[in-house]
Image (spheres, grey):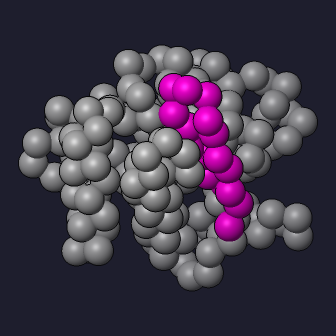
Amino acid sequence: MPDALYQLAEQLLDLLKQRQKTITTAESCTGGWVAKCLTDVPGSSSVFDRGFVTYSNESKQEMLGVPSETLSHYGAVSEETAIAMVKGALNNSQADMAVAITGIAGPGGGNPDKPVGTVCFAWAFQNNHTQTETLCFKGDRDAVRRQSVQHALQVAIKGLSQNNLRF
């Protein structure tokens, strides 16, 4: 793992430990990379609850309870799906906080409305405060995924750094 991602994961885990909070992840295009970064850090088991890798629409529905209507109306790569994923991760874990990522890492799969590199994020706390964001990253498949992981960790750190647990 690149040093920058390790440092971000370490920083997030330290904040979680300080605040006695736990985290879960729901990942599609990143294939569990956020969970891997977090669990690469020794001692992560005290704050990392679990990770869901929901690459297919069926797994999003089965594991996280993403409504089929959300997927058919908005698509797998949408903020609406990311919200359903993050809420499903919280509902199916004991975690205080969750991050969800769904996107098009490429090289194929894009279209004019959602080009390759489009990634939708959602972060949420059990208090129902949720934030979403959609970004379009440049680069090859690995670069899109790496940037997605970095962004997910950075925003989670920002949310935990604020005393009111808001993003």
Of 108 and 11, the residue lying toward us = 11
48 within the magenta span: no
Considering every residue shown, the one lying at the far front of the view is 163
Image point 16% across, 52% down: which residue?
41
Q: How many discs appear? A: 0
Image point 90% across, 36% down: which residue?
73
Where does residue 65 sit, x and y in percent of width and height?
64, 19
Report whether 90 appears left or right of 36.
right
Q: Is residue 85 above or below residue 7?
A: above
Q: Is residue 103 above or below residue 92?
A: below
Where does residue 60 sit, x and y in percent of width and height?
61, 29
Of 126 and 137, the residue lying toward us = 126
The image quarter in which residue 150 lies:
bottom left
> What range of the chain is rendered magenta?
120-135
Considering every residue shown, the one lying at the far bottom of the view is 139
Prevailing secondary structure class for the magenta stretch in the rendered image:
strand
Q: Is residue 34 above or below residue 73?
A: below
Report whether 60 appears left or right of 3.
right
Where does residue 106 sit, x and y in percent of width and height?
62, 67
Image point 22% across, 58% down: which residue?
10
The image quarter in which residue 114 lies:
bottom right
